[in-house]
Amino acid sequence: MKGQDEPGTWRAADVRYRLAEGRGSRMDWLADGCQVSRLGVTLAAMANAQGGCLILGVEPEANRIAGLRNPGDTIEALFVAAQSLEPPLILPMPQPIPIDGRQVVAARIPADMPHLYALEGRYFVRDGPLNSPLAAARLRRLLLERGDPGAEADCPSGASLDDLDLTVVSAFMNTLGVAAGGDFVRGLQRRGCATIVDGRPAVTLAGLLLFGRDPQRWAPNAEIRLTYHAGRTPTGQLRRQLIRGRLMEQIRAAVKSLAAILPATVTMPPGWGWPVEAVRQVIANAIVHRDYALREAAVHVDVFSDRLEVHSPGGLPGPVTLDTLSTRSFRRNPAIAQVLDDMGGPGAEMPGLQALADWADRSGHRPPVIEEAASGLRVTLYARGESFDRGGVRKPGRVVPTASPAAGVRAAHARRAITAAPAGFPAELLAESGDLRMKEAPGASEGTG
């Protein structure tokens, strides 16, 4: 998920390379022991622009690696600075990097966050290598783009930290380096899963969906509705499966079900062709980027004989359009995105869809088709061998050309309906009633939808 330009994969040579390039709008460094307020200004300025990287342990004037006396204290200072912003910034885990017998810490500030971040009521933005006050005109524009706080930050009435599964929380905190018995409430706050209301800890909707004992008590339709169809149209419905539970477990359960059944449900030959990881990416994107304010809507996954369709409630987030989808990301739900990223799940960044389109170009597949509808966003993966038009991005009722054949989602046209189940379709799915049940789906429940 992390590219070579992002901390998390860096080595000493990467730090030296960035220092040689110099400070800029997306790259900066500060010396050991700098004030938390100065850290906060830089974090806010980058988050309000296009994100970036901050390296600590480098003298900014001389560009000399001086190292850190205590990298752990530096990481703590970064989190304190991030939490001092309004709203608090959800920061990926900073990375200690050994270099020339010293250590520096690199922190990544995600791009295209859904909020504007202020420090003590002041808004900043990057102006080359500097942090500058945000001009009024740009502030108004960004407030329009990023003004929606998102439902994931809501604190449902009646919910408390007791509604979290502390075993799951503890296992997650351990992956972040928080020792058993440590301050898990503070760790949850840093991930947007808890907050302070009237001086007391409160759990957010994100926390309940990620770590809750019964997530659907608080968001009944935060679920995946998986439907298998006999042919290429919705008229030949064979079986429905309802997948519930915590978000990561929903992703795993849906992928497990699809991985077992897809090769037999798509047109043969030459076969499905898409790797399981591609299916996982599309489903994870739907979970991460859906609009959880739409409490009556669920993620729908429809399997036809020639394609897989994934429908996510809420449409494209923020300022992203079909024209900019291949080049711009936007985290509608930064807490959910970051925690799933920490857990090793895909989908934190929307450009994952572009990676699928690039893979399709290389493998001879019809690229994923992304369509905006009134109720949400639909992503379609077609079986290998389906024809396609490489000339544009499909929108409702029309095709908009893209800049290049590999620039994102392509249009699709001809669909021919068939009514019979394809050859090789598993006999157990042809029953008239019941549901497809799976074993070993901890925390996820399935039933007739």
Image (cartoon, rainbow, N blue to C red):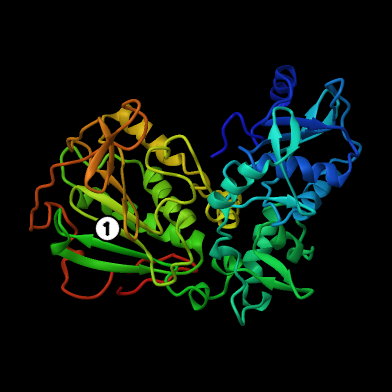
Q: Which amino acid lies under the numbered mark 1 shown in the image of this protein?
A: Asp
Q: Quadrant of residue 227?
A: bottom left
Image location (x, y in percent) of residue 179? 77, 58
Which residue extends farthest bottom? Answer: 158
- The C terminus - image quarter: bottom left
On the image, numbered disc 1 is attached to which residue?
302
Between 386 and 201, the one lying in front of the other is 201
In the image: residue 17, left or right of residue 360: right
Q: Position of residue 358 (x, y in %)?
A: 37, 31
Q: Is residue 328 left or right of residue 384?
A: right
267 versus 287 height, above or below: above
Residue 1 percent location from the top left of the image: 53, 40
Check the image and report above or below for 223 versus 372.
below
Marker count (numbered): 1
Q: Judge from the rendering whether residue 11 lies leftward or rightward of residue 398; answer left or right.
A: right
Q: Is residue 102 visible?
A: yes
Judging depth in this view, the residue of 138 and 217 nearest the camera is 138
Farthest residue, direction front: 137
Residue 365's quadrant in the figure? top left
The foreground one among 236 and 50 is 50
In the displayed orientation, state which residue is furthest to the top: 20
Query: At 55% from the left edge and 58% from the top edge, which residue is drawn?
Result: 148
Q: Nearer the viewer, residue 407 or 443?
A: 407
Mark 1 surroundings: few (<14), some (14-19) or many (≥20) residues within 10 A: some
Q: Is residue 293 shown above or below 383?
A: below
Q: Where residue 293 sits in the image (x, y, percent)?
A: 48, 67
Secondary structure beneath disc 1? strand
Q: Is residue 177 visible?
A: no
State whether residue 382 is above or below residue 212.
above
Q: Which corner quadrant of the image does residue 181 belong to?
A: bottom right
